[in-house]
Amino acid sequence: MSTNGKILVIGGGISGISAAADAAELGCDVILVEKEPYLGGRVVRMNQYFPKLCPPTCGMEINIRRVRQNPRIKVYTFSEVETISGSPGDYTVTIRVNPRYVTGKQPVSQAHIDAVATEIPNPFNYNMDTTKALFIPHDAAYPMMHVLKKDALTAEEGEKLKAAEPAGAIDLDMKEDRVEEKVGAVIIATGWRPYDVTKLENLGAGKLANVITNVMMERLASRNGPTEGKLLRPSDGKEVANVAFVQCAGSRDENHLPYCSAVCCMGSLKQARYVREKVADAKVTIFYIDIRTIGRFEKFYYDLLEDQNVRFVKGKVAKITEDPATKNPIVEVEEVLPGDKKREQFDMVVLATGVVPATADSPVPGVSLVYDNDGFLVDQPNGAGIFGAGCVKRPLDVSRSVKDATAAVMKAIQIVRR
């Protein structure tokens, strides 16, 4: 029997936010914990959703509002769950709240911003540009609060911050805090990360300037990205005119990720449209093993087949090198159908990196759960009180992640109300 009607949601991406809002609107108190200083996860770093190609704000904004305006939801950002103990219906959770050194008691003023000159790699843009060490994560962040990277400051900057008015906005002595919550059920929505493509030495990621990943491409195409939405290649800032997309970068490979990551094909098809829409007469080549589009997404693929500037080449890329003079990536591939070996230069190459569950690196602490061989969470039957939602269970697109979150809420409610 449940002794607590609260639900803990770990992860503030699209699955976690949807789960928290659904549970609260069904009458449950919710604790939402997110390790980043803002809600939104990977989705808010996208340029557009497929298949409608609308910006993430068109769906994320509604869900953030559902969370922000519901008094049943308590949000911990910049925080992590350290331990979970107990049993279904009666869990004790310890949450570590990391210091952001910005109190929220007073507004951060221009004097505070002027006191900091140090620039750090911008994590929101996958380190493709820099930001001040005192920064708001992005222009639609929730909560809309600055974050201070204290370790990056010089001693002089620290003194200037202490002297800046209004006093009380910055606390350089802020310590991490720990809070304890009692909950009846837990929903794990910690999401995913891109596969580490530096392990794919043959594809040159991390070494060749103009070989980037699909998540980086989303930021390049975004108006609030490092190039304000212009598709400029990293080496020299020139607009791209000939772009290659390399599918299954790490996926469907026994040496890396043996499974299909499900969303990469649609992601590259979407990004091919970015190129065609943003750069007049640009050429796009997609190197693929199979194009996998599910159900109604087939039309998205067929529309691109009619574009004469988009070429599909069936063949797994063996190697990417670089022209030392132009920094153009050189793609080597054997085209399956004619059996010809190709060696072509492009302005930029985008690697469709695979989906890796966050639990592959960081299993949920303090509790024994079941994961498959690839690190995806396996829900337990027979009334267990901890459930997965979204990409922590399998690769999913945004729409399916939201539906999966609702399903997790239905299971959790049965625990807290029985």
Image (spheres, helix red, strand yellow):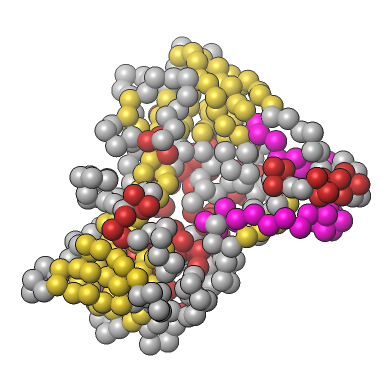
The outermost residue toward the front is 324
| Residue 201 position by quadrant | bottom left
- In this picture, which residue range is highlighted in magenta? 97-126
Residue placed most toward the observer, 417 or 331: 331
Q: Is residue 371 above or below residue 106?
A: above
The outermost residue toward the left is 338
Give how far across and how far down residue 224 sits, in percent: 59, 66
Position of 158 with respect to 5 (left or right) is right
| Residue 57 position by quadrant | bottom right
Residue 153 painted magenta: no
| Image quadrant where one finds the C terminus | top left
Q: At x 76% / y 43%, what residue is drawn?
A: 102
Residue placed most toward the observer, 238 or 247: 238
Give how far across and how far down residue 279 sits, in percent: 44, 82
Give how far across and how far down residue 356 sits, in percent: 36, 44
Residue 105 painted magenta: yes
Q: At x 55% / y 49%, what residue is drawn?
A: 40
Residue 26 visible in the current orientation: no
Residue 96 visible in the current orientation: yes
Position of 265 with respect to 1 (left or right) is left
Q: Is residue 130 above or below residue 169?
A: below
Q: At x 20% / y 68%, what residue is drawn?
A: 333
Q: At x 57% / y 66%, what residue is drawn?
A: 226
How many numbered callouts? Answer: 0
